[in-house]
Image (spheres, rainbow, N blue to C red):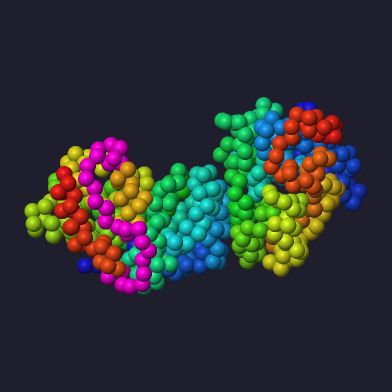
Amino acid sequence: MTLVASRDGYGSALVKLATDPQVIVVEADLGKSTKSQNFRKILPERTISLGIAEQNMMLVSAGLATSGFKPFASTFAIFTERAFEQIRNGIARPNIPVHICGSHGGIHTGTDGSSAQSIEDLAIYRSLPNMLVLHPSDFNSAEQLTIQLANKKSPSYTRTARNKTPVIYDKHAASKLEIGKGAILSEGEDVAIIACGVMVSRALEAAEELSNIGINATVVDMHTIKPLDGTLISDLAEKCGCFVTAEDHSIIGGLGGAVAEHLVENCPCPLERVGVCDHFGQSGDGDELLEQFSMGTTHIIAAVQRTIERK
Amino acid sequence: MQPQWGRTVMSTENGTGNDFSSIEQLRECAKSCRRNIVEMVHRANAGHPGGSLSAIDILVALYKTRLNVDATNPDDPERDRFIMSKGHASPAVYSILHEMGYLSSEDLETYRVMGGVCQGHVDMTWTPGVDFSAGSLGMGLSFGLGTALAATLDDSPRTSFVMLGDGELQEGQIWEAAMAAVHHEVSNLKVFVDRNRIQNDDFCEKQMRMFDVAAKWQGFGWAVHECNGHDMNELVEAIQWLDSITDGPAVVIAHTIKGKGVSFMEDNPSFHGAAPNDEQLQIALEELK
């Protein structure tokens, strides 16, 4: 199994976007970590360093965007939050197409510990009007979706992961991905597992194990948290009748929250949310931490069994 | 009074600066703006007259003598940018945009009214001629740095002018941007600080002492000039000084009086964010004749 981090997919996309003369990379010191350094290496003249100053980075990006550039600004997910109000008032409110990437999202970030593990970024950016919110699951989808952002006229927030995870899409499959459309990775009628980020590969593992005990699961990579693909969720409510969400993020307000909102308003049916249950992380190996916090494959399987019982 | 379209041409033939009649025109324009400012705030029964009246002479001098903008083509990509970081002083911006032909008298009557083009704080999505959506202090210098860097990347002569309040210098983001502007050696970023010495709650000296403001900018590596922010001759010279700085960012600290032009508002923290009543409006308009 090939293992690559989704943040590398972001860096790879920036290199491919270098042929677009309007694309510009904006950094707040962490280009080595977010992988925007890949762009800097080939186009230093179109890479702007702003030092360790995230608030300034966001508004400089807004100024660039109103002058016709397509800024891609990145730092750790948690440090984008330091500039939340700048993003809210200076980017989202005037609907300026600045593309923000927060790497190192989630508990899976690992040994750096809880200060570096954003568990709330998807929730807070999802609450902003005009914002697109993406959380790709692997290298190729991160690359593909980032490339698509360059033509968007609205601001966006993309969360990538620090650590290596299985490659889920080959290049051809990734080329079919579309912002705003959930990707069905396996089909079954008993339950729908809606996952994002590093939890997608675990959802697929869970589905495989469930099939061995006669439970057939649909698995969706919901790489776009906002706008949520409500049509797909409604279709799956009819087809499967119950749901599990799986995310490396607080169960409050993120993917689980978004799916719950849609279901309650449109097609009420059982939902179990797998994610960070209202607590902060700690240091440790990423995979080990997901187990510790009840977010492993076995926990998805248990959630599936609970939600099916509630049908 | 009819709006004055376009820019006033400043005579520099005598080599010492500015033609008196043109300076007089600037003063008259500022007086007209002041009347509109107090009327807008009175009509809305809300808003920020003090910081608008302190800033308006600077805006008049800048728009009328220097800023390369055109009301008939407000989105021209090659226009200069004016970024009003102290976005609560929106009546000052709307009044000069009215003088420049962007806004009608009827538009001014929509200040703070639902659906109106003149929002409570300056907003680029609502008002033609507004380049930046402000309202949260401390952000405008960063935005101006972004537009200045963009002009450099485009090899364009367009210039970014930013107006900051002195109270908002207490925001850390200002100094993030100040450091970055010098690091990137942007010479097309020009800043005015409206040094009116009053913020929302009280005098700046009581809220947060800032000591030597000029020294702070100098310490960050900026070229610094100080002037009387209500003297049109000094303001025109300050603008010329800003243009003379070609090796980095430059800031003019304009010493102003909050509420300037209306006796009971002058240097009075109560009129940072309060509207005059009917009687006070009449007194103000009498003083601004």
Which of the 4 image quarters holds residue B97?
top right
Indicate yes or no whether the magenta region holds residue A273.
yes
Which corner quadrant holds the N terminus of chain A? bottom left
Q: Which residue is drawn at 36% across and 44% down?
A: A227
> On the image, which quarter does residue B168 sit in?
bottom right
Name the residue at 15% across, 53% down.
A305
Q: Which residue sits at x=35%, y=58%?
A: A278
Q: Does the magenta stretch include residue B186?
A: no
Q: In this view, does B283 lie to the left or right of A37?
A: right
Q: Which span is picked out in magenta?
A: A262-288
Rendering coords of residue A244 (x, y %): 23, 51
Quadrant for the C terminus of chain A, please: top left
Where is residue B125 shown, x and y percent of the image?
Answer: 56, 39
* Left or right: B253, with A56 as reference point: right
Horizontal side of residue B271 vs A139, given as left or right: right
Question: Residue drawn at (69%, 30%), measured in percent from left and top?
Answer: B43
Q: Nearer the viewer, residue A68 or A126?
A: A126
Quadrant in the picture for residue A33: bottom left
Q: How far across and down, in percent of the image, does residue A283 sit? A: 36, 72
Which percent across, then down, holds residue A177?
Answer: 30, 50
- Pick the residue in front: B206 or A105: B206
Left or right of A252: which side holds B112?
right
